[in-house]
Image: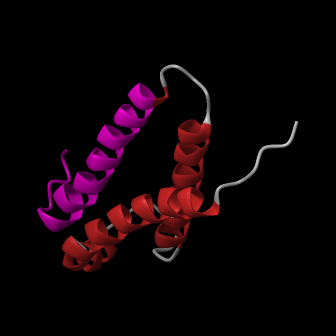
Amino acid sequence: MSKVIKLKELIISIVIPLLVGGLSSLFSMNGFKEFEAIRKPAFTPPGIVFPIAWTILYILMGIGSYLVYMSNCKDKYKALRVYSVQLFFNFLWSILFFGFKLYWL
């Protein structure tokens, strides 16, 4: 059985986490520069890897939320609320860690 992809809903589902990640990085931009300057283990990937990896992760999170939203699962709205809370904490993480330099957190 084939399901029709609702393009508008899919795009919105992908754009939401990308905006959250973009806003978070915008608010913590100066912290990234400082983070690059600190001493890190030799196995730490180059800085360019992180924005690429996070963009891919946010796209996948959006696709996942779309699949949940389009499902017939009785608990899909509960799952989407949990996803929203997790997305909120993703938003705060970069701001707290990089922006406010709360590395211990």
Q: How many marks?
A: 0
In the rendered view of the protein, which quadrant contains the C terminus? top left
Left or right of 16? Residue 99 is: left
| Res 100 → quadrant | bottom left
Tell me the residue at 56%/37% (across/down). 68
Q: Position of residue 96 (x, y in %)?
A: 17, 56
Q: Is residue 52 above or below residue 84?
A: below
- 22 or 12, which is in the foreground? 12
Q: Residue farthest to the left?
A: 100
Tell me the residue at 22%/57% (across/down). 97
Q: Is residue 90 above or below residue 31?
A: above
Q: Residue farthest to the top?
A: 74
Left or right of 57? Residue 1 is: right
Q: Is residue 28 above or below residue 77?
A: below
Residue 87 in magenta stretch: yes
In the rendered view of the protein, which quadrant contains the N terminus? top right
Tell me the residue at 42%/58% (across/down). 17
Tell me the residue at 61%/27% (across/down). 72
Q: Position of residue 38 (x, y in %)?
A: 28, 70
Q: Which residues are magenta?
A: 77-105
Q: How is the image coloured?
A: secondary structure
Q: Position of residue 20 (x, y in %)?
A: 33, 62
| Res 99 → quadrant | bottom left
- 44 or 75, which is in the foreground? 75
- 49 or 80, which is in the foreground? 80
> Does any portion of residue 44 appear in the rendered image?
no
Left or right of 4? Residue 66 is: left
> Does any portion of residue 46 appear in the rendered image?
yes
Q: Main secondary structure of the magenta part?
A: helix
Residue 98 in magenta stretch: yes
Q: Position of residue 40 (x, y in %)?
A: 37, 63
